[in-house]
């Protein structure tokens, strides 16, 4: 095999073999944001929007230190790790959030699927979207949308 076909195969291979922890239906109730946590969460989100990811993570850690079941902070931190391309860390953190019943649950599943999709593991992404859909929660339209995009863009065959 010459170097060019080998290089082509390497470029087409998945970026990594990401592991998705077992995603089981939620068994715990998520903690809601307290009045003192909301401003810190907003600060973290503003820093994220500015591309100051490490500073945003520090804000989310501040919230989670006091309230480890705050699904908003867990989700935002996982999203930040995704943007930093720390895919496994993002998946692991978001998977932790799947054990909590909360309105954000479909977004958490979507985040895990999106990370897998971006990391060129579309079949794993589809599997995660389907698990989220199977929960039959409100606001799961995002999962159908993301799954459709993954089928269209990555799994055309």
Image (spheres, rainbow, N blue to C red):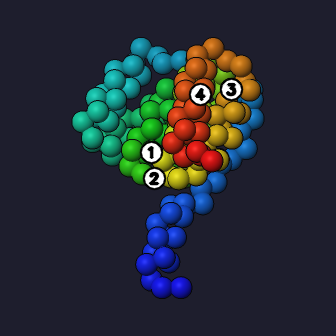
What residue is pinned by disc 1?
Answer: 82
Among the two numbered marks 1 and 3 on one chain, the one whose residue lies closer to the N terminus: 1
What residue is pinned by disc 2?
Answer: 86
Q: Residue 97: horizontal and vertical position, in percent?
A: 60, 33
Taking the image as shown, residue 10 lies to the left or right of residue 55, namely right
Q: Residue 79: horizontal and vertical position, in percent?
A: 45, 38
What residue is pinned by disc 3?
Answer: 133
Above or below — where is 134 with respect to 23?
above
Q: Nearer the viewer, mark 1 or mark 4?
A: 4
Above or below — where is 35 with respect to 110?
above
Name the residue nearer the viewer: 61 or 13. 13
Residue contact between numbered discs 2 and 3, judged by CB atoms under 8 Å: no
Among the two numbered marks 2 and 3 on one chain, the one whose residue lies closer to the N terminus: 2
Q: Label 2 to label 3, Cα distance in Å? A: 25 Å
Among the two numbered marks 1 and 4 on one chain, the one whose residue lies closer to the N terminus: 1
What residue is pinned by disc 4?
Answer: 143
Dot 1: element: helix
Whether residue 58 is visible: no
Residue contact between numbered discs 1 and 2, judged by CB atoms under 8 Å: yes
């Amino acid at each position: 095999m010459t170097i060019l076909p080998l290089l082509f195969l390497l470029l087409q291979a998945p970026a990594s073999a990401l592991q998705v922890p077992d995603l089981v239906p939620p068994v715990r109730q998520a903690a809601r944001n307290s009045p003192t946590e909301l401003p810190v969460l907003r600060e973290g989100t503003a820093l994220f929007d500015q591309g100051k990811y490490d500073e945003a993570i520090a804000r989310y850690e501040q919230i989670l230190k006091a309230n480890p079941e705050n699904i908003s902070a867990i989700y935002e931190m996982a999203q930040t790790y995704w943007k930093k391309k720390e895919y496994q860390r993002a998946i692991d953190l978001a998977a932790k959030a799947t054990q909590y019943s909360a309105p954000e649950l479909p977004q958490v599943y979507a985040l895990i699927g999106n990370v897998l999709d971006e990391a060129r593991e579309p079949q794993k992404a589809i599997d995660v979207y389907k698990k989220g859909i199977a929960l039959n929660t409100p606001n799961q339209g995002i999962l159908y949308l993301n799954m459709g995009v993954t089928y269209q863009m990555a799994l055309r065959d």
